[in-house]
Amino acid sequence: MNRRLKLGTRGSPLALAQASQAAAAIAAANGWAPDAIDIVTITTTGDTVQDRPLADIGGKALWTKELDRALAEGMVDLCVHSMKDVESVRPASFRLAVILPRADVRDRLIGAASLDDLPLRAVFGTSSPRRAAQVQRVRPDLVVEPIRGNVQTRLAKIDAGEFAATLLAAAGLERLGIEAGAPLPVELILPAPGQAAIGIECRADDWDVGYALEAASDKPSFDCVMAERAFTRALGGTCHSPIAALANFDDFRLHLRARLYSANGDDCMADEAHLLPGDDAVPAELARAMLSRAPPSIQQLFDPV
C-alpha cells in the first residue's frame, strides 16, 4: 500500500474503541506500523438525534448514511461498523471485506440480577423492538419505555433511577472495559443479527484496499454474520420488526437459529436450519417459511422479498 489509509467511524466512545481495534487488526495482518491508518470521526444522524427511537426517524440508515457518503466521495478509504446496526441491503458500490473475530454475542441485563428479580410493572428501558418483544414475552407486566444515548449515558440513566433496568450488548461493554450487568443466555434472549461483530467496508472498485482488508477478516465470523444477514434480508423487515438470529458453526456446517416476534412479544415464531458457509438460499428459505406460518401480528411487521 503506497498511501496512508483513512478509516471512517462514528464518534461515540464505543465506535472509537471499535475503530482502533479495526485499525490495529488491519495493520497487524499486513505487517504495517501500528499507526499506519488514520481514524476519521464522522458525525451521524443517529448520534445527534437522541430524543426519539431510531425506528421513528429513519432506522438503521441513520448510523450509516453519513459514513456512506464519506466513503463514496473518497473522504475516507474504509468505514467500520457495528454489524447489528447495518442495513441488510447495502449499496453495490461498497464491499463488506472484513468481519473481525466475533465477541460475546449475549445481552447483559443492567439493573437486576435477572428479569424475574425486577419488581412488578417496573419500567424497562430499551429502544430495540427485538429486546422489547423478548423481555415482554418473559415479563409481560413490565412497562417498556424508549431509552437512547451511548452506553455510558444509558448506564447513568439506570443509576439515576430513570429506568429499573435495560439490556446492553456484552461485546460493547467489554470493548469499553466496563464490567456491568448479568449475561443472559441466548436461549432466553437471542441476539440481533450481526450482534458483537465489527465489519469494515471499502469501495467495491478499490482493489488494493480490498485485498489488504481481506487479510484481517475472520472467516468463521464472516460466514456466520453473512448467514444472519441473508435471513434478515429475505424478511424485508424494518427497525420496527423484532428479529433475532444467531449462526454458529456445527462441525463444517452453520447452525442458524431464528425467531420472529409480534411487537409485544405475545406471538413468536422460532425455527432453525443447517447450511453450508456462503449459502444464502437456505437462510432466505427459512425466513420465508417462518413468515408463511406466522400469525398476522408478526406478518404485518415484514415485507418479504
Image: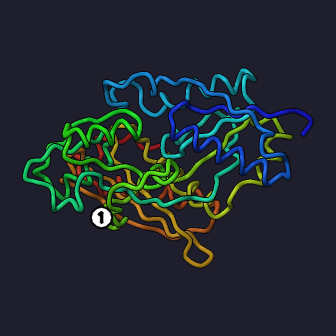
Q: Is residue 231 visible?
A: no
Left or right: where 56 falls relative to 48: left
Image location (x, y in percent) of residue 295: 23, 52
Extreme residue toward the bottom, this view: 251
Picture quadrant of residue 109: bottom left
User: What secondary structure is found at the residue carrying circle 1?
Assistant: loop
Give the quadrant of residue 238.
top left
Could you say which is closer to the camera, residue 161 or residue 216? 161
Identify the amino acid type marked 1. Answer: Leu
For this orientation, the residue located farthest to the right is 2
Q: Which quarter of the picture shows residue 123?
A: top left
Q: Nearer the viewer, residue 115 or 113?
A: 113
- Residue toward you, 227 or 234: 227
Image: 181 above or below 84: below
- Residue 251 locus on image (x, y percent): 59, 79
The residue sitting at the left extreme is: 120
Instruction: Name the side, left or right, on which 255 lies relative to 147.
Output: right
Q: Position of residue 241 (x, y in %)?
A: 34, 42
Q: Is residue 122 above or below residue 156?
A: below
Residue 26: x %, y % from top left: 75, 48
Please determine whether, in this image, residue 302 is positioned above or below residue 253. above
Q: Quadrant of the N terminus?
A: top right
User: Is residue 134 visible to the viewer in this orientation of the structure?
Assistant: yes
